[in-house]
Amino acid sequence: SNDGASPRGPLRYNNKIFEGEKKDNTMDEVIINEEKKIDSGNSTTNNAESWHIEEDEIEYPGQRFSHRQEEVLLDISSKYQKIKVFRHKKFGTVLTLDDCVQGTSYDEFLYQEMLTFCALASVADRQKLEVLVVGGGDGGVAREALKDDRVGCVTVVDIDEEVTRTSQKFFPSMGNAFKDERVNLVIGDAVEYIDKCTAT
C-alpha cells in the first residue's frame, strides 16, 4: 500500500490501537514509551496499575508474559527462592516462584491432573500403591493422587517449606491435601531422600 497505512490494519500494542501513517519513526517512539510503563519493577509508572512480568531470554528469547496484578497478597524470599502471590481478574489467585507463574486457582487442576493420572494410568497393577511426589510442595499432585483408590499413601518431598505454607494459606484446594493422614510431607532434598530409600 502506498498510503502509509499498515496492510495488516491498526497496530495493537499493550491494549492500545495505533493507526495512521508512520513518519520519522513516530510509531517506534510511541511503542517504546508504552513499553516503559510496564518495564522494570513489575509496575507501571502511573501507579494506577501493577504488572507481574515474566521474561527469560534463555528459555523464551524475545518474549514477555505479563499479568495485571489486582492485589499483591504475598511477596517474600525464602532460603531458596522468591515467592509471590497475587490476585488476577481472570485467573484468581496466582503463585509465582522466582517470578515464574507456577499455578493459579482458576486452572491449576489442568496441570495437576495430567501430571498425576498419566503416571498412575501407566500402572496396571490393582494392588495398593505408594506414591512419591518430588517437589510437590503446593499439594496439588498429592490431592489428585489420593483420588485413585489404589493409592494407600503419598510422600511429598520438597526442599522449601515456605511453598507449603504459602499453598496452605492461599491455595487451600491444594494445600489442604497435607491434612490427609495418608500424606507424608518431608521437607528436605529429594535426591538425598531417594538415596536413603534405595540404601535401605
Image: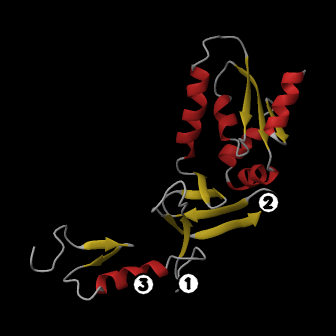
Question: Is label 1 in a helix, a strand or a loop?
Answer: loop
- Residue toward you, 147 or 197: 197
Measured as percent of width and height from the top left, residue 139 is found at: 70, 41
Q: Quadrant of residue 53?
A: bottom right
Lateral position of residue 24 relative to residue 172, left or right: left
The residue indicated by pointer 1 is 47
Please state which amino acid type lies under the numbered disc 1.
Answer: Asn
Q: Is residue 4 above or below residue 178?
A: below
Residues packed near mark 1 inside 10 Å, few (<14), some (14 to 19) or many (20 plus): few
Q: Which is more N-terminal, label 3 or label 2?
A: 3
User: Which labelled disc corresponds to residue 33?
Assistant: 3
- The residue under the point 62% across, 16% down is 123
Question: Mark 2 highlights which residue?
Answer: 78
Residue 82 pos. (x, y %): 72, 61
- Decide if residue 119 is in sight here: yes
Quarter in which the N terminus is drawn: bottom left
Q: Amino acid at mark 2?
A: Ser
Disc 3 on helix, strand or loop? helix
Q: Nearer the viewer, mark 2 or mark 1?
A: 2
Mark 2–mark 1 CB contact (< 8 Å): no
Cα gap from disc 1 to disc 3, whole angstroms? 16 Å
* Residue that appears at 69% across and 48% down: 172
72 w.r.t. 126: above or below: below
Decide: few, some or many residues near mark 3? Use Cα within 10 Å; few <14, some 14-19, many ≥20.
few
How packed mark 2 is, by other alpha carbons closer than 10 Å (few <14, some 14-19, many 20 or more), is: few
Res 179 seen here: no
Residue at the far left in the pictured view: 2
